[in-house]
């Protein structure tokens, strides 16, 4: 059996050109390509001519879909050209590498099942041995060294090209090894087994396309006992593969045998323009700059061309590479400004593009449903970020929104909601950007249903069943409503009812009922669900009202602060509910709370303010309570807490009600300097929540002092009273209490 080893660089243009030349020259009857045997299932099921690279084969562990690998192909990948050649000439194909059933199992466990003989001497270890030979020629980057020697420098014939690569790699392997030496040896053992199989099946001329590093190892395909032992007992898992579209920017990923590249657009240009010495590329560059309103003349192109080729001659190269062209572009077209080169990086050097695969390739039903939906809704897969504004008042806009919300429920991260519909508007803004991992996420959810709708319903039902977090389940209810999963809404409401019945934490119940009230008021739910939701809300509210006093019993400040905020928020939300019976019961419970000595002053003050606003307390009753709370016999700090709860961010009452103003005014006047300084931070925290305008009005009112008609002023106070009080009040306002 005659064998030719074609050592290549994955995604190398020069490697691909030489591969085609070598295959035409050698005319093999069998082609072996570096890659796991499991890839053949996907390769055999499709007409490769119907595929538009860049594309990839996704390989995944059926027991754990997060354990996966991608095997990308560009139009200029030597492996891809080898596949096309074999299909065109009806030549048998074989993939040879460590099987994915072992690779993915090892990747998941991250353990080595075999060891190398410790007594055997190994060459010097280096993760990238090419760097050493590149440094000898003055290159800091081994990829650039390889590019200039083997991808952009062409030999007289392909045979000379591949023979040279084998010589270089053989010399490197004699002096260096890599940290993955064991894995490389195991992989090469499987490659040798493929050559042995080809010999057994009486193949006459075999071409083996593999990574350059492996080429010398395959010159002989006899296996030693040690090599055979290395591949015994390897762990296994079950594997599936699927074609997926890929992108130029994703070719930089290093996954499977897809070595990363940083200029896919340039390599694609070289593939389609193999005789271009830079002229066509510079014309493309000039067109990009002109679209950016940068003035580029024909003279700029000519000067850039001459400069790039002069640089290439100085560096001993036959023609200019991307490096020389970029240097010339910066000097001539960009006038030395490197930043302008960014204009062509994305559009030309990387050249964002996405491959296409036939629709008839075997896929899971949920994949087919996804593709059908995005086609129906005209939501194409794009690598770049695309925004969609959906009008929910139109049937098609609502359908698109429902579909995208279902994807979010399934945790398929393709579309992101940037702006949601709120009160008074019926629009949603979504941003979509496709990544290869999205396909894996769709496959992952295939176990939940054959369509996006059924998958979302079953997935959210399972989440609901497994969750014991009341707030988390309420969030699921919100998601189910916007995704129009009406059957799931019943399941979720049942779980909320069960969890809320079991809970005795008033804080949690308040946090839960507030979003439920908003859902009932503003969400679009069918009538049967709406009735059940209203009953559920009433049950939770009755439970809160009955337990509120005990929940507020002797709380410290931090817990009182949280309860104060929750009480205020729930009170505001009850106006949305518009249920007089519930509201009345709520106010009765607050009245009881306001009169309990075991309740903190913060909560007491809040209750009095709510009851005053609801006209449940008269102003005289509130004034008496305020006078009592601010009595000089009380701890000033506790009085400040009562005042914080009473005012709670609103200065209206303070500005408009003279009685309230006078009581607070007189209380401040009664404080000695030490007490005033002590409570100043507390007062400032209260007053800083007022608007700038209200704080300015308070400052003016403080300067005016108490009105002469104020009947609570002690008659035996002398005229210095107002002056003294105003000075203290102004002190509280200047730069501290009422500072803007």
Image (cartoon, rainbow, N blue to C red):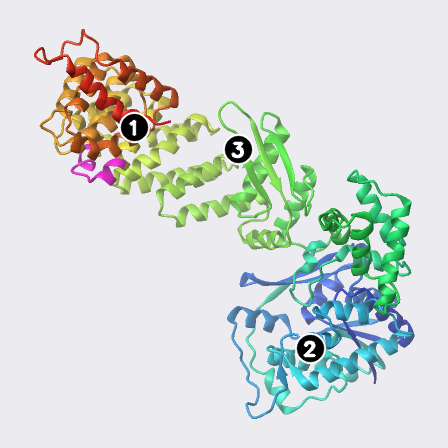
Locate residue 14 relative to residue 387 in the image: left or right: right
Count how many numbered circles sit on residues in the image: 3
> What residue sits right under mark 3 in the picture?
420
> What residue sits right under mark 2 in the picture?
132
Up-down relation of residue 130 to residue 657 (above or below):
below
Quadrant holding the N terminus: bottom right
Tell me what residue is drawn at x 42 percent, y 45 percent: 464
Tell me what residue is drawn at x 69 percent, y 68 percent: 257
C-alpha distance separating marks 1 and 2: 69 Å
Q: Quadrant of residue 494?
A: top left
Which label number is shown at residue 483?
none
Q: Secondary structure at mark 3?
A: loop
Residue 557 is one of the magenta-drawn residues: yes
Q: Position of residue 437 (x, y in %)?
A: 61, 54
Q: Residues within 10 Å of mark 1 (few under 14, many from 20)?
A: many
Q: Secondary structure at mark 1?
A: helix
C-alpha distance separating marks 3 and 2: 55 Å
Q: Work out whether mark 1 precedes mark 2 in sequence or the reverse, and give the earlier one.
A: 2
Tell me what residue is drawn at x 62 percent, y 84 percent: 124
Residue 426 is one of the magenta-drawn residues: no
- Of 568 and 709, nearer the camera is 709
Up-down relation of residue 303 to residue 32 (above or below):
above
Q: Secondary structure at mark 2?
A: helix
Q: Position of residue 138 (x, y in %)?
A: 74, 73
Q: Residues within 10 Å of mark 2 (few under 14, many from 20)?
A: some
Q: Which residues are magenta?
A: 549-561
In front: label 1 or label 3: 1
């Amino acid at each position: 059996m005659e064998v030719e080893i074609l050592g290549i660089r994955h995604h190398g243009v020069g490697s691909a050109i030489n591969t085609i030349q070598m295959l035409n020259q050698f005319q093999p009857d069998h082609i072996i390509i570096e890659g796991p045997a499991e890839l053949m299932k996907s390769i055999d099921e499709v007409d490769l001519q119907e595929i538009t690279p860049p594309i990839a084969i996704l390989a995944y562990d059926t027991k754990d879909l997060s354990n996966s690998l991608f095997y990308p192909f560009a139009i200029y990948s030597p492996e891809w050209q080898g596949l096309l050649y074999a299909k065109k000439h009806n030549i048998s194909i074989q993939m040879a590498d460590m099987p994915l059933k072992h690779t993915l199992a090892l990747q998941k466990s991250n353990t080595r099942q075999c060891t190398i003989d410790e007594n055997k001497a190994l060459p010097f270890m280096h993760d990238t041995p090419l760097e050493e030979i590149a440094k000898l020629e003055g290159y800091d980057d081994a990829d650039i060294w390889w590019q200039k020697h083997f991808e952009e420098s062409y030999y007289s014939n392909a045979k000379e090209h591949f023979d040279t690569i084998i010589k270089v790699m053989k010399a490197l392997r004699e002096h260096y090894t890599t940290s993955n030496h064991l894995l490389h040896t195991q992989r090469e053992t499987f490659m040798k087994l493929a050559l042995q199989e080809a010999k057994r099946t009486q193949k006459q001329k075999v071409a083996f396309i593999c990574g350059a590093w492996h080429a010398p190892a395959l010159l002989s395909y006899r296996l030693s006992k040690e090599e055979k032992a290395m591949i015994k007992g390897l762990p296994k898992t079950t594997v599936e593969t699927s074609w997926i579209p890929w992108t130029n920017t994703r070719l930089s990923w290093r996954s499977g045998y897809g070595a990363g590249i940083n200029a896919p657009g340039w390599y694609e240009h070289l593939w389609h323009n193999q005789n271009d010495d830079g002229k066509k590329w510079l014309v493309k560059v000039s067109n990009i700059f002109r679209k950016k309103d940068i003035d580029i003349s024909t003279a700029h192109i000519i000067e850039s061309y001459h400069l790039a080729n002069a640089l290439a001659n100085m560096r001993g190269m036959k023609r200019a590479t991307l490096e020389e062209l970029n240097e010339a572009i910066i000097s001539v077209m960009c006038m030395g400004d490197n930043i302008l080169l960014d204009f062509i990086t994305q559009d030309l050097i990387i050249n964002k593009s996405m491959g296409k695969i036939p629709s008839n390739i075997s896929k899971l039903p949920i994949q087919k449903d996804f593709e059908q939906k995005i086609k129906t809704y005209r939501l194409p897969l794009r690598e770049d970020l695309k925004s969609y504004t959906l009008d929910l008042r139109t049937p098609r806009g609502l359908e698109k929104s429902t579909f995208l919300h279902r994807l979010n429920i399934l945790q398929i991260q393709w579309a992101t909601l940037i702006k949601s519909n709120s009160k008074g508007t019926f629009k949603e803004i979504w941003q979509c950007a496709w990544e290869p991992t999205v396909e894996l996420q769709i496959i992952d959810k295939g176990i939940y249903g054959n369509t996006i709708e059924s998958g979302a319903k079953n997935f959210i039902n399972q989440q609901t069943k497994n969750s014991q977090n009341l707030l988390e389940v309420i969030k699921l209810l919100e998601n189910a409503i916007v995704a129009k999963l009406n059957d799931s809404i019943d399941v979720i409401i049942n779980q909320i009812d069960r969890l809320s019945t079991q809970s005795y934490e008033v804080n949690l119940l308040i946090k839960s009922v507030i979003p439920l009230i908003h859902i009932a008021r503003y969400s679009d739910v069918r009538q049967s669900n709406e009735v059940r939701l209203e009953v559920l809300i009433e049950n939770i509210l009755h439970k809160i009202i009955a337990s509120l006093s005990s929940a507020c019993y002797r709380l410290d400040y931090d817990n009182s602060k949280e309860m104060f905020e929750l009480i205020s928020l729930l009170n505001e939300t009850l106006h949305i509910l518009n249920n007089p019976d519930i509201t009345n019961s709520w106010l009765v419970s607050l009245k009881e709370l306001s009169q309990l000595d075991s309740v903190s002053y913060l909560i007491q003050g809040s209750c009095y303010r709510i009851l005053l606003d609801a006209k449940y307390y008269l102003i005289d009753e509130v004034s008496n309570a305020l006078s009592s709370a601010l009595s000089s016999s009380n701890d000033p700090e506790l009085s400040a807490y009562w005042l914080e709860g009473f005012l709670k961010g609103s200065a209206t009452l303070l500005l408009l009600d003279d009685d309230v103003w006078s009581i607070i005014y007189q209380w401040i006047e009664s404080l000695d300097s030490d007490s005033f300084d002590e409570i100043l931070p507390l007062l400032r925290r209260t007053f800083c929540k007022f608007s700038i305008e209200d704080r300015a009005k308070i400052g003016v009112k403080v300067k005016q002092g108490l009105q002469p008609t104020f009947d609570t002023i002690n008659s035996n106070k002398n005229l210095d009273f107002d002056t003294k009080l105003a000075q203290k009040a102004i002190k509280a306002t200047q730069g501290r209490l009422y500072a803007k």
